[in-house]
Image: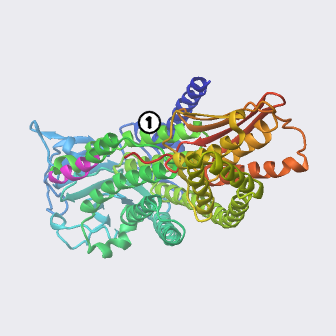
Amino acid sequence: MKKTVSRKNKTVSILVFLISTIITAVLAFQLPMVSYFLPKAAETMGIEYEKKAEPTYSIFSDKAIYVTDEWEFYWNKLIITEELKEFEPDLIVDLPSAWTTYQINNERLSSGGYATYRKVLRDVYSPEPVIITLPNLPGAYRVYVNGKLVSTNCQSNSDIRKVTLSNADIYNYPLSLDFSEDGTYEIIVEVSCQFSSGITVLPVLVDNAHYESNMTALLVFRYFIIGMVAMFLVSIIAISAVAFKDNRFFWLIVLCFAFLFRIMISGNGYGISSAFFFGLSYEIVLSLIYATTYIIKLALFMHIARSLNFKISDNFMVAISGAFLLCVFIPQFVTEIIYDSANYMFLQAVSYILDLYLVYKVSVEVAKKKRFSFPFLIASCILISSLIIDNYYINGYISKNVEFVFPIAGTIFILMLLIIQVIRIGEAYVAELHAAELKEELADINMRLMLSQIKPHFLYNALNTIKYLIKKDPKTAEQVVVKFSKYLRANMDSLTQKTPLPVEKELEHVANYTDIEKHRFGDRLSVVYDIECNDFVILPLTIQPIVENAIKHGINQKPEGGTVTVKTYEDENFFFVDISDDGVGYDVNKQPSENDERSHVGINNIKVRLKEMLGATVDVESTVGVGTKVLIKIPKNDETRLPEC
């Protein structure tokens, strides 16, 4: 049966994993596929793309046109700045692309340096002033149309070859296009990079008013998201300080900080936050953005692993962490790799291994129907896909402006985690109230159970037995007195015993009691112990009252007497204590009489104590004329298993 259930869970896990992976892949890669690899389909996203020699561009306020096709490329030349009169292109290139992929005279170009891109547009029409800009480009650039500066991300009077770009300001100079019949415009883009490698994003031709309005709205939205996440972070820190002290919250806090850092420094967000980084070059900040991706994914994995409590292979985590460190630090010393967008996309793809592993592990928990596993699976897929989209956008593989995707997805993710934690806190609060009530109830039960064990009739019987033995067998009488004193001491000690004790201690108490009773019953009472395991704990006054009931209500009612058997054993998940007798038995479905009521109350008290304190269950089986069996089943865990010596 267990194998069938396990096989079923495994099948469901694989099915959930495949569905989740496919959905995540579709969400993550549809934009790059549509926007970059399938330019024809890009028309549905408001991008005009026609692969012909002389494309026609009609610009309206609600549409941005991405200027693709072939551009002339001039290495180490600035046509406008250097006032070059005669020039021939070194290459004809397609954009976006890193110039580290180009070769001149059979030599591959290095990252860093400066160059000019030139293209002639024909049949351009626009009723309003337009600009040509290169959003999210790491290097410094200036765009000229027919020799007139229309946009730049550095001061116009500075030497572009010496600019250390902070990306803090974008200077746009709207161009009123001349509606002449030929509508021909020469576009020249001068680019200077410290570490990166040219135009790795698509140049965009857009109505200036629409562009400015859109950029302002995106910036306001981004910092609105930052404010929300900061509020979530403060709430999480407050919750972790008051409600819990575990590493689930540590990783959630790390995740929030990394998320805040990334959205502050990526895209147009760095335009405001650059002051906090002392105007650090955006080309350097770009490497911090990529490094933050690894931190986010590690924190995400660790938080969900702790929350769902699934096991993680130490070797796997060491390998993944080592790979992430290599991807972050080694390229810092090999700028040819780090600032080539194609190479950096490959480095980022290393983190997909952890993404797949996380989705698989959570899928396994979903198959097991573990609480909150499904929300965690949905949240993980959302965040992972948004990170992939953001990386593609930063590297220029998505022409549409989708920089809002990651902030929105990340906020939804953190909000979902916060809601889960609030639900857990509410449940923990209710459980704490219940535990306080239960503590008082258990204390009362323990008191009543202890007092019920000090029965006058047993004291009288035990003392009469000792009195008889003193005359007949003084030495045995002395032994019985010792056992009787140990029995009384164990009952009194149970008043202050607040934690479970080793089962051996409880069995000693049972032995002291049964030895006294055997002297009273003689050959009519036999007690058998079959102890297969004793490396677990049990509550005091648990086995002994059950044995006492077996003797009093089972064996004593049978003229010829009988046998009580105490057995312990275990399987993969539980410890078992089996107390059985071959006495008169009783009908378990019949309402107990007044004489039997007290014994039934004692069993019920034992059930409550075991259930609440150890999570154990007590099953009673009895047949009239055959006997009674009481089975205690204790789950194996750190609380019930004795520590190894």
Residue 643 located within the stretch drawn in magenta: no
Q: Quadrant of residue 315?
A: top left
Q: Residue 635 in the image: x percent, y percent?
A: 58, 42
516 vs 304, left or right, is right
Residue range in magenta is 324-333
Residue wearing tag 1: 38
Residue 13 in the image: above or below residue 405: above
**Which color scheme did the rendering employ for the protein?**
rainbow
Q: Tell how many labels.
A: 1
Tag 1: residue type? Leu
Residue 236 in the image: above or below residue 181: below
Q: Residue 85 in the image: x percent, y percent?
A: 14, 56
The front one of 282 and 447 is 447
Q: Residue 312 in the image: x percent, y percent?
A: 40, 43
23 vs 583, left or right, is left
The front one of 123 and 168 is 168
Q: Residue 401 in the image: x percent, y percent?
A: 45, 54
Residue 507 in the image: above or below residue 254: above
